[in-house]
Amino acid sequence: MLARVVLAILLISTSPGIIKAQYPGELIGRVTDAITGEPVENVLAEVLGTGFSALTDGRGEFRIRGLEAGRHTVRLTRLGFQAQELAIEIRNGEATRLEILLGASPLTVEEVRAEVETTDSPGLISISRDEIELRGDLTAGGLLEGRPGVLVQRRGLAGPQTVSIRGSSADEVLVLLDGAPLNDPLSGEADLSTIPASQIESITVLSGSQSARYGPGAAAGAILIESRTTASPFGARLETGSLGFWSGSAETSGSVQGLSWSAGGNVRTIEGEFEFERPSALGGGSEVRGNSDVSEASAFGSASGDLGGGTLRLRAGYTQLERGIPGPSFAPTPAAREDLSRWRGQAAWERQRGRASLSAQVHSVIQSVRFADPSPPVGLAYDNRTDALALGGRFVGSISLDGALESLSGGVELRRKRYESTALNGSAPDRRLDFGAFLGGQLSTTKSAIKPKLVAAFRVDRDDLARTWHTTHEFTLTASAGPAGFHIRQASSYSPPSLGDQFFREGVAVEPNPDLRAERIPNDLSAGLSISGEIGSLAVGRLGIDGYTADIKDMIIWSPDFRFIWSPRNFDVNRRGLDAQGRIEFPAQSLSFSATYSLARATYDRPGEDAVQVIYRPLHSGSVAAAWQPTSWEVAVDARFVGTRYPVPAQLNGLTPYWTLHLRLRRAFDAGAWEIIPTLSVDRLFDNDDSLIFGYPEPGRTIRFEIAAHPQSG
């Protein structure tokens, strides 16, 4: 089997906020009553100025992941206890542990209100391992559905899952798995269905231009996926469900001679055959959707320990996937298949000395993929294979300072790719070597009541194929006043054209375009407001709104010429919109409610006024969710909305908006030294089969049942 690559690099940020995104730190704490010594449940732990928070469980423990390296303040509050604020130091990729004693507060009938610093990172979504476990989604794409500003484009039950951020194309979103770009070297898109949720430790989504932080490909945003670094001493789970679904996984961990390690594996299969109703425009009637099966096996391993006065961390993983490609329902491909295998490895070392730190990361990805169809409905039979090897390295130095200039960081990055593909024509290059250098800093002052902070990042990249240099930048200003936080951000970014668009093999009525220009966003401007704090004496709330304007120059869109020959071409696209999210928690009742809304206006920049949305970009989307999580129970309901989509570049044949409802029930049982957790998940509870993309039907209601077991902690 031939291969294909996706290159490896870890892009640590050009500032402490950027360093966070690549190797976030972790805060682990345990809260006990200062008098009785008993654990205190439902204590709200907030890391001020970040938007991260957690509630203590029945053991008085909490865990907050995704924190940037540097100095922070953590605030702990609970009704009936004295609030406490502690200064902490978070280090890159390390866990900081706290033991906190809370004393009882004097009895009072006054309303309790907290003034919380809320300078949330603009456009940031953070998903921890705990949330991944609670949601029960099978892939990285599933975990991102229903998030503000993020649209997951699914092509059927087991098909590819690509991501659009704020109305962008999928090739304008850079996906980094342990720092290695996962975007396909041919299409430029990242298929998140190939990343099992069982292998993911955390996901961070950064909306808006991110090239100054993460380099080429991050024109509309970046998705940072960290693979598993922790596991229980031993755990196992089995799952079965509709459409012939079943899966099994196991994990273990330990330590030996100062080296901590963890490992695990997962297998999954779906038969995927179901009956669906054909649209009336295609003749109506029912039909069986076949060739939508998938089989997947994956494994991960990690180890960490001390080396050379610093910390060394090793991670590796493997994924093998085989699935059918059913094609659109109006032109099915019952014999088309995809086979993929991916090996990945990462080594990261960091040394902290006083306020200075030095880090180095190297990565490799070997990926092999084959697409074949001996009898397609249109065109000739094909059997295309792509093979590539990617290597990357990143070296970063940073220092924390006193005074207005709080920190400085900078570094260099090298990326090397080699690839071979039968899907490309003879003029396609078979290798590239890219170089990037970056510098960042952070200014702040505590003398002002609004605590302003300015983060700046600059980067220059060498495009080896185009033989050009690209410069990008970012400026983010944040401030806070009591419970309110404000931010304004201006940035630039770019995404180079993909090899597939430039060099694919010419076919009937289609031809490549080797003269494509890079997609550019010269002025990405956003501003937002966030408010968080206690609401009366019963609840804690948070509300955030982020508006943006980010026009795309030379967006690559397929279109025909005067001969009706289809080819990828450059077009200008206007983007305006806003993302909003709110959450309210009632700690004493273990109850929470949340909602999101996104307005993404992505229209073609044509002469005169034109309100035609780019194809398959809904103007409106959102979600509403509720969860009840007492000590041993979890009941979660999640409703997601997708607005009107247009399958053509005109206001014609609009697809009807739709809602989907998802239900999840989980109960933990003590079984001596073990904890047994059965889970019931129901997707599309009301059996609706609406789909985002025309011609890729959904099966309607599906049910999964899981049972998991692991040793009791403590």
Image (cartoon, helix red, strand yellow):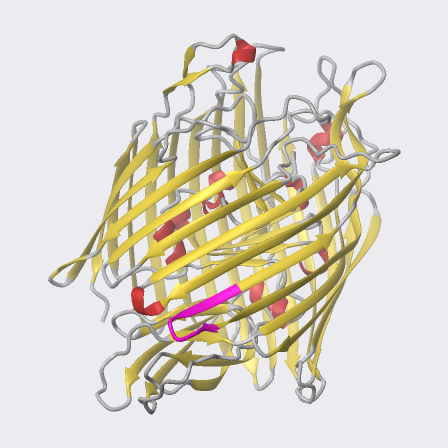
Q: Is residue 319 left or right of residue 418?
A: left
Depth check: 4 or 457 in front?
457
Q: At 56% from the left edge and 69% from the top edge, which residue is drawn? A: 531
Residue 411, by quadrant, is: bottom right
Residue 498, by quadrant, is: top right
Direction front: furthest residue: 109
Direction top: furthest residue: 283
Residue 588 image position (x, y, % from top left)? 31, 69
Direction left: furthest residue: 672
Whether residue 687 can be seen here: yes
Prevailing secondary structure class for the magenta stretch in the rendered image: strand
Q: The C terminus appears in which quarter of the rendering?
A: bottom left
Q: Is residue 636 left or right of residue 236?
A: right
Residue 413 image position (x, y, % from top left)? 68, 60
The answer to whether 429 is drawn above or below residue 408 in the figure is above
How many badges with numbers are in the image?
0
Residue 471 image position (x, y, % from top left)? 81, 57
Q: At 49% from the left edge and 43% from the top edge, which residue is drawn? A: 141
Q: At 32% from the left edge and 80% from the top edge, which residue is drawn? A: 31
Whether residue 179 can be seen here: no
The answer to whether 639 is drawn above or below residue 501 in the figure is below
Depth check: 416 or 594 in front?
594
Residue 579 image position (x, y, % from top left)? 61, 53
Residue 33, by quadrant, is: bottom left
Tell me which segment is drawn in magenta. Answer: 534-542
Q: Is residue 196 left or right of residue 413?
A: left
